[in-house]
């Protein structure tokens, strides 16, 4: 293929990508992110990845994209916008509702983005030949550094990609191909002296600009962390029951953000401002039905209910008798992390009732972690 043909292919590919709903397209090579390796190794060696063992297990594959596919010559990075229609920070003061991260209010983006990638990849094969592989963020791939090298945005001080055209509300996907496509110029950092994202973090999870300790991050704690929420972070969770958008939402570059144009990524009404009381009574079956096709489904009913109970506990004296009764029911839940969270929640919203039940329930409790909740 001549240089002119390569250029024409890139332009027609970009046009097809925009037609499919991608909001930006860039080109890089598998070898472009060598500088990102030391940062990832430091992150893992410092233990900042917490229980995300897959980051350590697949470290060697993650630091070098060629380990995913040695024959790849080019990487096509693609971006999908999921901008919200309202400021998610406004809901943090509404104690009786659960605050779900914007990206999880609609359908699971993995399925949506991957389908778009596959359609575009088929188009590329039919148009130019070659071979392709598509990846969303479940693969051991450093997508954010690749996106920066492809010119889509830069990794902001909150460690997420920031786009000059779409702010912090974007998903990433990639197509690896054996076709040689000229790489773009890497995007430069436009954060400047701003540190709004660092200052707003409820748990002070940022060790320094561009460096996070995930073990303190509310998104990590509510999604990846399997055990009880550490007591020192419970009050800071507020009403956040799945993820946290604070550092994304305050980014000044969001003034250029647009609302999601993919309807399946728009928040479902029942997920935008769900009443905490309505979420506490979910059985395993009810949880699966309630969150069908949602990324929330993958954490399971017990972990999700743990989060909801912490949010109810943070209601304090504003909780009513219905909340107290619903919390009490969870003192007998089959899952230890639910029983433990219920103990803490009851202590926050009705301390006399918690003290009344303490002796009886401690005597019956066999799980040491749950028993320890009564001592907090």
Image: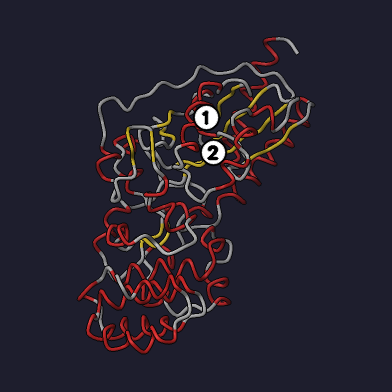
Name which residue lies at 26% across and 38% down.
Answer: 196
Name which residue lies at 37% across and 32% down.
Answer: 210
Give the mark nearer the N terminus: 2 vs 1: 1
Residue furthest to the top: 3
Residue 172: numbered disc? 2
Q: Nearer the viewer, residue 119 or 206?
A: 206
Locate residue 67, reporting x and y percent: 69, 30
Residue named by callout 1: 147
Name which residue lies at 51% across and 29% down.
Answer: 145
Hey, which quadrant is residue 182 in on the image? top right
Disc 1 element: helix
Mark 2 touching mark 1, by CB under 8 A?
yes
| Left or right: residue 322 compared with residue 137 | left
Residue 122: numbered disc? none
Q: Nearer the viewer, residue 43 or 34?
A: 43
Locate residue 101, reporting x and y percent: 41, 55
């Amino acid at each position: 293929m001549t240089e002119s043909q390569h250029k024409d292919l890139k332009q027609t590919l970009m046009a097809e990508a925009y037609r499919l709903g991608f909001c930006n397209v860039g080109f890089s090579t598998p070898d472009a992110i060598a500088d990102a390796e030391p940062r990832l190794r430091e992150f893992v060696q410092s233990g900042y990845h917490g229980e995300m063992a897959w980051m350590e297990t697949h470290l060697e594959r993650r630091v070098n994209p060629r380990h995913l596919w040695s024959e790849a010559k080019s990487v096509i990075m693609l971006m999908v916008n999921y901008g919200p229609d309202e400021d998610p920070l406004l809901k943090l003061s509404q104690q009786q509702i659960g605050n779900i991260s914007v990206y999880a209010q609609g359908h699971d983006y993995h399925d949506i983005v991957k389908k778009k990638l596959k359609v575009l990849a088929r188009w590329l094969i039919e148009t130019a030949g070659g071979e392709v592989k598509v990846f969303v963020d479940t693969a051991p791939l450093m997508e954010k550094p690749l996106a920066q090298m492809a010119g889509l945005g830069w990794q902001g001080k909150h460690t997420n990609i920031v786009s000059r055209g779409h702010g912090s509300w974007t998903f990433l996907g990639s197509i690896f191909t054996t076709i040689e496509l000229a790489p773009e110029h890497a995007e430069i950092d436009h954060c400047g002296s701003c540190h709004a994202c660092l200052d707003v973090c409820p748990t002070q999870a940022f060790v320094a600009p561009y460096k996070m300790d995930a073990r303190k991050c509310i998104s990590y704690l509510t999604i990846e962390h399997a055990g009880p929420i550490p007591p020192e972070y419970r009050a800071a969770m507020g009403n956040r029951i799945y993820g946290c958008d604070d550092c994304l939402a305050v980014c000044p570059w969001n003034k250029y953000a647009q609302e999601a144009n993919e309807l399946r990524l728009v928040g479902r009404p029942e997920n935008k401002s769900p009443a905490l009381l309505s979420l506490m009574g979910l059985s395993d079956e009810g949880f699966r039905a309630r969150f069908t096709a949602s990324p929330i489904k993958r954490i399971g009913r017990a972990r999700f209910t743990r989060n909801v109970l912490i949010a109810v506990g943070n209601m304090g004296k504003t909780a009513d008798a219905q909340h107290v009764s619903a919390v009490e029911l969870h003192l007998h839940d089959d899952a230890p992390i639910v029983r433990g969270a219920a103990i803490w929640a009851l202590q926050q919203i009705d301390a006399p009732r918690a003290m009344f039940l303490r002796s009886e329930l401690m005597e019956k409790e066999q799980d040491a972690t749950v028993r320890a909740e009564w001592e907090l």
